[in-house]
Amino acid sequence: MRQFFVFIKCELGQTYDVAAALVDQVEEARQVHSISGAFDLLAHFSVDTDADIGRFVNQKVQTIPGIKDTQTILCFNAFTRDHGLGEG
């Protein structure tokens, strides 16, 4: 599985509606957080290893009503207590 995050800027007054739509309509959404700063939401997604992330964001995320802008962050490795460090 490939993990990535998307910062999402919403139209004014639409943040909670966008968050609900992501959770309800996008099966690959693992978590959606409201955040402070330049963006309104941070969404964590998990897709198949061979998935086209650009196409996924374009077709499944950016088409949700109320989304104004996105920025995608690709993940290379997850470092946690149970995996990611020193495993061969």
Image (spheres, rainbow, N blue to C red):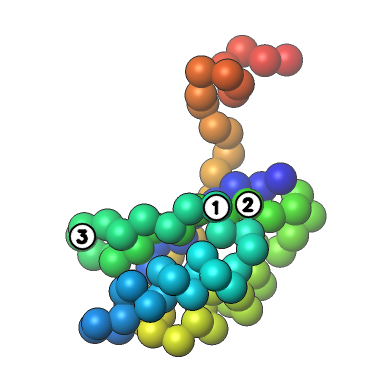
Does residue 41 appear left or right of residue 85 in this picture?
left
Q: Secondary structure at mark 3?
A: loop
Which residue of the protein is positioned furthest toward the right in this rendering? 50
Whole-angstrom CA distance, mark 2 to mark 3, is 24 Å
Nearest-to-viewer mark from 2 and 1? 1
Whole-angstrom CA distance, mark 2 to mark 1, is 7 Å
Question: Disc 3, disc 1: CB below 8 Å?
Answer: no
Q: Which mark is residue 37?
A: 3
Residue at which label 2 appears = 46
- Under mark 3, the amino acid is Gly
Label 2 crowd bin: few (<14), some (14–19), many (20+), radius 10 Å: some
Q: Position of residue 55 (x, y in %)?
A: 66, 72
Whole-angstrom CA distance, mark 3 to mark 1, is 21 Å
Does residue 43 appear left or right of residue 33 in this picture?
right
For marks 3 and 1, the one nearer the N-term is: 1
- Under mark 1, the amino acid is Arg
Question: Disc 2, disc 1: CB below 8 Å?
Answer: yes
Where is 5 relative to 71, above or below?
A: above
Residue at which label 1 appears = 30
- Under mark 2, the amino acid is Ser
Q: Secondary structure at mark 2?
A: strand
